[in-house]
Each structure stands twice: as C-alpha cells, then as structure tokens.
Image (cartoon, rainbow, N blue to C red):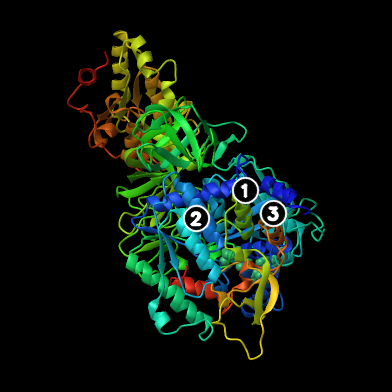
Amino acid sequence: MDSNLSHLEFLEAESIEIIREAIAGAKNPVMLYSIGKDSSVMLQLALKSFYPASPPLPLLHVDTTWKFKEMYNFRNQIARDSGMELLVHTNQEGVKAGISPFTHSSNYYTDVMKTQALRQVLEIGGYDVILGGARRDEEKSRAKERVFSFRSEGHNWDPKAQRPELWNLYNTKLNNGQTMRVFPLSNWTEKDVWQYLLQEKISIVPLYFAKERPIVYRNETLIMVDDERIPLETGEKPQMKSVRFRTLGCYPLTGAIESNASTLEEIVLETMKAKTSEREGRLIDSDEAGSMEKKKREGYF
Amino acid sequence: MKNISEFLLNQYQKKTLRLITCGSVDDGKSTLIGRLLHESQNVFEDQLKSLEKDSEKFGTHKNELDFSLLVDGLKAEREQGITIDVAYRFFETEHRRYIVADTPGHEQYTRNMATAASNAELAILLVDAQKGILAQTRRHYRIVTLMGIRNLVIAVNKMDLVQYKENVFQKIDSDFRNLVLDHDLNQIQVIPISATKGVNITENDQTISFYSGPSLLEYLDQLQIRNSSNNLKVPSSQESSFRMPVQRVIRPDESYRGFSGRIASGSVSNGDLVKILPSGVQSSVRSVDFWKNSISNASKNTSITLTLEDEVDVSRGDVICAYEDPPEIADQFQVDLIWMSKEPLIPGRQYLMRLHQQEVNAQVTRIRFKEEIETGKHLAAETLEMNEIAQINLSTNRPVVFEPYSSNRLMGGFIIIDKMNFDTVGAGIIKFALRRSSNIHWQKLQVNKVQRAKQKMQTPKCLWFTGLSGSGKSTIASLVEKKLHADGIHTYLLDGDNIRHGLNRDLGFTNEDRVENMRRISEVAKLMVDAGLIVIVSFISPFRAERQMVRELFDPSEFLEIFVDTPLEECERRDTKGLYAKARSGKLKNFTGIDSVYEPPESAEIKLNTITSKPEKCVDMILEKINIF
Ligand SMILES: Nc1nc2c(ncn2[C@@H]2O[C@H](COP(=O)(O)OP(=O)(O)OP(=O)(O)O)[C@@H](O)[C@H]2O)c(=O)[nH]1
Ligand SMILES: [Mg+2]
C-alpha cells in the first residue's frame, strides 16, 4: 500500500482501526480468546488500541475441556497479566453427556462443544459484537467473509447475503437479536502473524516451539499424548519426537509437525518454506468438503 | 534466504499491492487467480491435493485442474461454477506482496465487486476473446473509474479458443482504447492470455507470437503504482495536509485524555497547531502517542492517539486537522452514487450517511441523471434501481467535514444505510459541495466577496429571470440593468441567447444539454456574484429541479427568482422572433412550451404579469424588492 508504512505496520494500523470501530458500534462487546497465537496477536492489538486505558471488553474462552494442559496454564497467566476480565464457558450438557473427541465424530464433537457452547454463552451474555482472530488466508470460505460479518437472529451466516463493505466504512448497525462477528486479522497471513509475534516479542504457548514430546500416530497425524484420556492400543507406546504446533486447538484433534525450530526466528524461517498449509494439522476441517462453511453458517467462529 | 535478519529486511521492504480481478460472467477471473497462485508457487501441497479432488467433482474440463476452485470457496459457488462474493487471496513474489480480491461477474452481485474495488489500487479487467467487451465489462470498468482506480490491466483471456489470433486481440484492444478515451488513467496495459493453459501468466513463452510485451505477473511485479492509496490526485511525494477523524476519546482517568484515530492524510508532530472540525476550535498537539511510547510524530495510515494542550471539546466523528489548511464543511453535495439494494432509491427519503466516522441523516434532493451502462449516456431518472450509477445532489441534516474523493478517498467516500433494516444500500463519492456552510479554505484568500462588494459599495446579487421564450425576460432584464447602471451600480447581464453563441455554443436543446447549459450559466453567475456584481440572468430555465440547483449555489439572501409569467398563447401571439411559427410547423425541435416542457416556479420571489403591467412597471417592482446598497 502506501510507501510510508511497512507491511506489518500497515496491517497493525488497519486492525487497530477495526477494533476501535467494533467497540464504537457495540453495546455489549466481547473478544473470543482461544489461547492460540492469533489470540495472542489480537490481545496485543486490543491493548494497543485503547492504551493507556484497558480494552473495554472482556475476553471469552469457550472451553471444550480438551485443550492442552500448557494452554490452560498460559490462559490463566494471561488473565493475570493483561488486566482484562476473562470469562470461561463450557457446554455442561455436553460434559454430562460425556461427549469426547475420541468416542464421537469430530463433527458432532465440534458442534456440541464448540458451536453450541458458543451460541449458549452469546445468548447468556447478550453480546452483540464478537471479535475473533480468524484470518482470510486460513481457509476457502473464510476468504469470502467480510471484516464485519453480519449474523441474523440465531447466529447464522448467510454467505450469499453479506452486506457490502466499502473502504474502511464499517456498517455496525444491528436490529434486536442480530449480532456482528468482527475479524480484525482478516488481511493477515500466517507469515504475518509469526513475524509480528517476533517483532513484538509477544509471549505464546510454549507448544509452538519445538521440543521433545510424547507422540502417537492417528490418521497419519502426529498426536501428542497430553493426558491419560487418550486411549492407547495395547502395547502402544508414545514415542518422543521433536515437534511443534503451527496451530493449537483440542489436543486429540490437533496434529503436530516434526521440527527443530525452537525460537521465533527459526519458526519464521520455517514458515517461509512450508509446503503444506497451516490447517492440515487440524482434523476437524478436513472432515468433509465445505465443512468450514457449513460450521460457520451454523454459528461456529 | 540465508539468515533471519536478511529475510526480515527483505520482508520489511517489500511493498503490498492490492488488486482486483473483474469483468463479465465467465470471463475466467477466478481461473486466472487460481493460476496465478499456482504458478507463483503460492499453493500448498495439501491445497493442491484437494484441488485435484474438487476438479474431478465440480471441474468444467475433463482431466484438467479447474483452478477457479482454488478461489470459489462457497458451496453454492462450486456447485454452480460461478463466483458470488469476493475472495481475498494473498501471495507474494520476489518483488512484491499481493492482496488479490477476485470479484463476481454476475450483475446481481455487482455490490460485491464494488466492495472489493473500493480498496484496490489496480484492476485486472478480463475480456473473453470470443465475446469481446460486454455490458458487464463496461459496468465494471465504470465502477473501477468511479472508485478512482487508475492502474488498469486488460487481460484478453481465452486466447486459446481463438487460436491466439492477432486480429481478435487487436479488435478488443482498439475497442477498449475507445472506451477509456475520456478517462484519466495513469497506466493501462493490454495483455493477451489463456488462464486455463497458463499462457502469458508468469512468463511470455511466445505461444502468442505477435505479443512481445510482459506477461501478467511480470507486468504487475515491475509496475510503479503512481497514485497513493487514498490520495488520487496528489502524487505521493507531495505531502498533503494532516487530517485525522476521531474514532474514540480515551480517558482512563483524570490525568489523560487522548483522541484516537487513524491518520487519513498528512502527518502530525508534537507542537503542531491543529483545528478541530466542525467546531473550528484551535489547539496544539501535546503528544503523539502509540502504545507505551510517545512517538513525537506520525504519518498517514497510522493508528495513533493524540493529546492536546487545551481542554477542548472533541468527540467521535470530529476531525483533527492542520490548522493552516483544514478540509471543507458542507451539507449539500454533488456526488456519484451506486445503488446496491433491491428496494429502489427514493429521493426525499431519509437515509443514514456514513462518511469516515461521521453519521448523519441524508436525503437525495435530486437525481441529476443516471448513466446508461451500454452507451454512457445520461438519462433522466425519478429513482434508482439496484446496480444503477447516478449523479445526484445529496443534502445532510447537519454539516459534515469532508474532502472531494478525488483528493482523498477516506474523506470523500461514503455509504448509505437504510434506516429501517440497517442494510448498506448505496455507496458514493463526493465530487464537491453545492453550498458551503463554511469553507475555511477560502478564508485564506486575501480578498473575498465581502471586500470586493464593499469596494463597489453594493451587495452582490443574482436576479434570475425565468419564463417562456418571448415572455419579455430580455426586455425587462435589460431595462433593469440600464437603470442600475445609471445609478452607479456594477452589473452584468447574462442572456441565454447570447451565451449560446459563445460559451455554450456546443450545446443543443435536449434535456441533458439544457441541464448543462443551465449549470454553466449558473456557475458563471456565481463567479460574478463572488466578484461583487449584480448579475442579471435572462434565461428560459424550464426545469424546476435545475432552478433549485442554481438556488442552492447561492446564499439565500443573494438569489432572487423572477418569474416572467406570460401565458403561452400570449407569447405565441407576440412571436417576436418567429420561433413559435417554426416550432409549430415542425422546423424547430425541442421548443419550450411546444414539444419541451416548462415547469413554472412555485415560489418565485417575484412574479411579473406582462399583460397587465408595462415593462417599466415591472422594473420598478423589481427594484423595490431588491436591496443592493
Ligand atoms: N478455454 C479456456 N477456458 C477458460 C479460460 N479461462 C477460463 N476458462 C473457462 O471459463 C469458465 C469460467 O471460468 P471462471 O474462472 O469461473 O470465470 P469467472 O470470470 O470467475 O466467472 P464469475 O466469477 O462467475 O463471473 C470455466 O469453465 C473456465 O475453465 C481460458 O483461458 N481458456
Ligand atoms: Mg469467478
């Protein structure tokens, strides 16, 4: 774009503008916090947007209870350091029903523990503007979504009827019951995120850095044995492998990659050379063609 | 890349180009983007694998990869083989980084194309070699120019289907050059390609023997983007003045009050004198803050927070700007508008208008004309349907701070929102203000209207005579001037017939030409009023809407509409110039009162009856009413 700013500076300035607009148009905003690297960037941008005031919205973690242990530790640390309120919500009905990614299909599991859970807490909290860290480079249907993405009553996304969105003019107007999902990182790529984490020295969950970890193979994917809930075949023994994660989610559904990159610098260089996409490690997205769009229509983030 | 610092430096220096693909249905836009991603090595292995699967399932060509499926990501798009909404894709080459927006060709989804175009610096307009330039090609081209994109690539696609023939390419090339003739484009490149065969995408391998220019990607990589992103007229080297619309007041406690926003143009430093608009209050910058640092200065596009030396009233929507060169403030505008809703535009209805951070009520006071896409002709219109483009007058319920879109995209582009369902129903660009609430630019002038008038010891006015041909306008107007002149008043008489011999000799008598005729005369009259003169205009001025427009150009106390109300029969009976006879016999077309309408004024300041009153009496009536000393 304009010559006076570097690429990252431009993206940062654009995202801050978006965050401020989201808040200006909101009655009751909330920011989804998934503990991943994109959430770390989002948090940093939110802090920058309102400094020296504290960001005028709480963080919300929709917890499936199946995240990596290190993610929970990191989340609690962040809640202390950021000075922001952190809300946590779990679909208790799902927990009672014993929904597990090991016994149920990833589709069903995701619907109950993520999509339903999110819809529940949005209803309970009455949030009208929900900020999230999704990026357009992640997936084909995300590449189609507006920065300010309108949701009808019932949180549904209609990709054929998106509001026009011109220049940097965001129409944040809502009638009762309608909500807005806002994606300040829309124009960022995975490479940008890593470079920004490096530039800003932002702390992220240690799982992103390569380390020897106990690994088993599931569906050609490297799954880390994070706790005893993972069913092992008789005689199966986790192997120690130097791995890291490009993206973090529920541990049973998140594939690691073999790597020795243990610093942000090394990760940035490795990302440059990557031959596969970031989401290859996510089992839930490859379920069925068009699965992300379907989930999004139903209210998934 | 050897080491991290070298890599980061390279990344730091690499510029981003935001571009769109556009053009008619099925011209191959999505296929081209998919190809471009693939050939520039920006498709991951797993994505390529699913493309193979998808191509089998949805692909349009047997046993070939269908690259459009890399981009058309929605279920409905893949099933129908069309693009519905914009896809944003990111890729980079050795030379630059690209954000590409692939837009839909279907007319129904034009609003999505406009969405993408609003943020683009370059457009690739595709033309199917077999079909040539179609209505939708023209529509997209029009939107590209409307949005101020001045870098254009015409990709003549599907050259494989015309055996790479030169004459096919040349025909489209010359058709296109005719189309762009009257537009101010920085650069335009026409490239023959085949998206499916990968011809001329990343390199020119001489498959197309007659074309020796650069391939598409070679061209994009080396292109100098001359216009900066939101300042289209001013070269980026030339610094424009500081403007920052305020997004939010940041107030953590009593000790800090900061105004945050993103700089729309220029730069700001500690100590700078600034003005806050619309209030006009002055202050100076205490600090330019970003995050935990006071950065002492910042330039265009950065998101910052300013603190000021004085306790001034500033809120969201205000604009903090350079003291010596503030933007304009106005509540009446001439704008270009594209309508994007199934519900037609209704002039007079209140809509919400969003212009940077300002939100106001606005109504269309007049549709000046709408554009016929096929021919570019200007058509009269009562309303606008979806996807129509028009030039309109817009009026807001309170003054807004703005700049013409041509000098600043961010201060001159706006959207229209329906007040009931909150849909975004229109988008427009401000061309200029019709009436200035206050134009601070002009305060800078050494001599102004008031001073000029004072020297002449008179109050400038515009006396606008309207009425049928032969009603007596010229006779009375001329007597008025004579009388005023004898009294030592500085006057000028603009007579419709005389002006048609000079300034307006290129205009005929169609409605469009009459409107233009009127516009020019009114602008001239306005300049003369500004010069301090009493301007007398004698001019049929048949249309109410145009007379309203003229009125809007002047301050209310400056303008007097004088209706010379002589009935048609009487004018025809007098027929001093023999024109009615000619018109009646069909020798004269578009004659007002015969085969072209005259809309009588409803609230003229002065109404004259030339049957009951002699011209001298009429002159007295007028002189009584005006107050010029
Ligand atoms: N032979 C040939 N076919 C092409 C070429 N480019 C595109 N096509 C075919 O044209 C059809 C339409 O291509 P798309 O890329 O979907 O067209 P589009 O312009 O994106 O269409 P919309 O987005 O719906 O307006 C597909 O069947 C393509 O395979 C080309 O260079 N040569
Ligand atoms: Mg397409």
Task: State the SS at label 1.
Answer: helix
Residue positioned 40% across, 27% down in the render:
B283
In space, the residues marked 1 and 2 are separated at their CA atoms by: 20 Å
In space, the residues marked 3 and 2 are separated at their CA atoms by: 55 Å
| Tag shown at residue B565 | none
Left or right, B523 with reference to B168: left
* Residue position marked by numbered label 2 in the rendering: A43
* Residue position marked by numbered label 3 in the rendering: B171
**Label 2 packing within 10 angstroms: few (<14), some (14-19), many (20+):** many
* Residue position marked by numbered label 1 in the rendering: A7
Q: Is residue B309 above or below residue A242?
A: above
Depth order, front residue of B615/B539 = B539
Q: Chain of mark 2?
A: A
Depth order, front residue of B222/B539 = B222
Image location of residue B66, percent across then percent down: 66, 72
Circles 3 and 1 in contact, beta carbons < 8 Å = no
Q: Is residue A249 above or below residue B404?
A: below
- Residue farthest to the left? B612
